[in-house]
Amino acid sequence: MALVTLIRPPLLVPKWSDSGPITPPIGPAYLAAGLQRAGHAVRIIDAVGEAPFQVTRLFNDRMLGVGLTNEQIAERVDPTSDMVGVSCMFSQDWPELRRIIERVRQRLPRVPIVAGGEHITAVREFTLQSCPEVDYCVLGEGEETIVELVRAVASGGDVSKVAGVLYRSPDGAVRQTAPRGRIQSIDEIPPPAWDLVDLNPYLDNGLGFGVNRGRSMPILATRGCPYQCTFCSSPHMWTTRWSARDPGNVLDEIESYMDRYRATNFDFYDLTAIIKREWIVAFCELILARGRQFTWQLPSGTRTEAIDEQVTRLLYASGCRNISYAPESGSVDVLNRIKKRMHLDRMAGSIRSAVRNGLNLKLNIIMGFPDETRAEIMKTIGLLARLGGMGVHDASVSLFSPYPGSELFNTLRANGAIPELSDEYFLSLGTYKDFSQTTCYSNGIGARELNAYRLIGMSAFYGVQYLSRPWRLWRTVANFLSHREESRLDKSLRDLVHRLLPGFKRRRRAIPAA
């Protein structure tokens, strides 16, 4: 048996970003569950949950770190650990995570360090080359790989026989083992080991991925996405295989959290939760049949093809209150170029039925794709205005960021638009939601002009919405003053204020710049 310490790094967000939800560490919790089932001892250092209101100014006050500092994290690592694992899902976190890894190595010079997550999978060779403190990279889905890797390292076995690993051999050469296929039966994956995490800071303060509708727990009902959008790194991490758990299995997990943690709301972290109409219908009908009362939401965005009049009625009746649609663009030409298989007219029909049946809707829009023209951006602004008039509640207009592992990232690297993988590049990826910073990869449109289009698009959406439904403006103001959340705008406003004004309701302790 080995002792494995898993580190969930602090949340890194630009100072003026309206995004940055504080969420429980579902990834490390899943890895820990697999390790426990294999007989290993596991400890999780949840840098966010252990100090959710501690804000550290980082990188010349450009970024804010929410959670423990790298010094505090290194001090918490058990010196008897046989392996330390770190997770990096978002590339903008890498500059600070690298500093955490360096501090851990200084404190524990002989303990193997393994890194995993979407960022690590995308830039695996770069990780080992730029951070010699990392000994192993777990590639892709990690639950099976981490168990086999720990067994091999602890027993002195042959790491080269563990599929899905990049490692540094004794002679210093970087070697990659055979690729590992996706886990075939996701119903057999043990549920997250939440017993290793203090969930009270999240549950007691309404912290989570979605809108604060009570004591919230995260849920993963599906894995992967069958689509190949060129701006998304999911195909590189998960392939294009979409798998869904049995609806009863998902509801059993929900009910266990209701009983164990008094949870009343559930945030689905799925990449694309609704693909098959029969699955979502069966899930909603099962909730109604069991008669359990709770709310749930889909904050990360989903497809609309399966969401018709009947489905929207079932969603609301079963407790779903917030859902995100992701059209990305109002231009058919842009959608074709980015391989976004979205039919805007069908989406409009789905939106009408969703609004009619009481669901709170949010749009995800991206501007500034390479080769996107001003005329195409204007079509997106027109779409925002139309959907605001149709009753959509929220819109998130982000600027394009070329994430490692995506098709567009590879294209931009090849043509020299991303000259090197530097800290500056990684930090710039976080500016997609920061109105004070603009990183532009658009041909022929400057950064300031692009940011102006974003502001025009947001103004068009909310202007039309509030003109046609003025009571929503007063509700937004009332919700902010009363610390109540119904929409993603309510949540974004509160998240921003909490980071910038530590004394606003929730007390946060600021740490001097690092």
Image: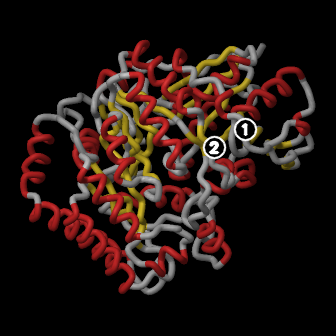
Looking at the image, which is closer to me, 116 or 233? Answer: 233
The residue carrying pointer 1 sits among few (fewer than 14), some (14 to 19) or many (20 or more) residues within 10 Å by Cα, namely: some
Amino acid beneath label 1: Ile
Give the residue at mark 1: 183
Mark 2: which secondary structure? Answer: strand
Q: Quadrant of the C terminus?
A: top left
At x 66%, y 31%, the residue is 85
Q: Provide residue 93's location: percent of width, then percent of height.
A: 52, 47
Task: Give the mark toward the camera: 2 or 1.
Answer: 2
- For disc 2, the neighbor class at 10 Å (few under 14, some 14 to 19, many from 20) is many
Relative placement, left or right, of 101 versus 502 is right
Quadrant of the snapshot with the N terminus: top right
Is residue 161 shown above or below 341?
above
Vertical arrangement, residue 150 with respect to residue 417, above or below: above
Image-quadrant location for residue 4: top right
- Asked which quadrant contains residue 192, the reply is top right
Please say whether residue 219 is visible from this viewpoint. Answer: yes
Classify residue 298 as left or right of residue 242: left
Q: Position of residue 372 (x, y in %)?
A: 45, 81
Residue 101: x and y in percent read 62, 36
Residue type highlighted by circle 2 = Ser
Dot 2 or dot 1: first in sequence order is: 1
Q: Identify the residue shown where x is 27% and y is 70%.
A: 457
Position of residue 403 measured from the top left corner of the image (x, y, whole percent) = 56, 60
Q: Which dot marks residue 243?
A: 2
Above or below, 468 relative to 472:
below
For the residues labelled 2 and 1, the Cα–Cα distance comes to 9 Å
The colour scheme applied to this rendered structure is secondary structure
Residue at 59%, 52% (x, y): give it: 225
Dots 2, 1 in contact, CB < 8 A: yes
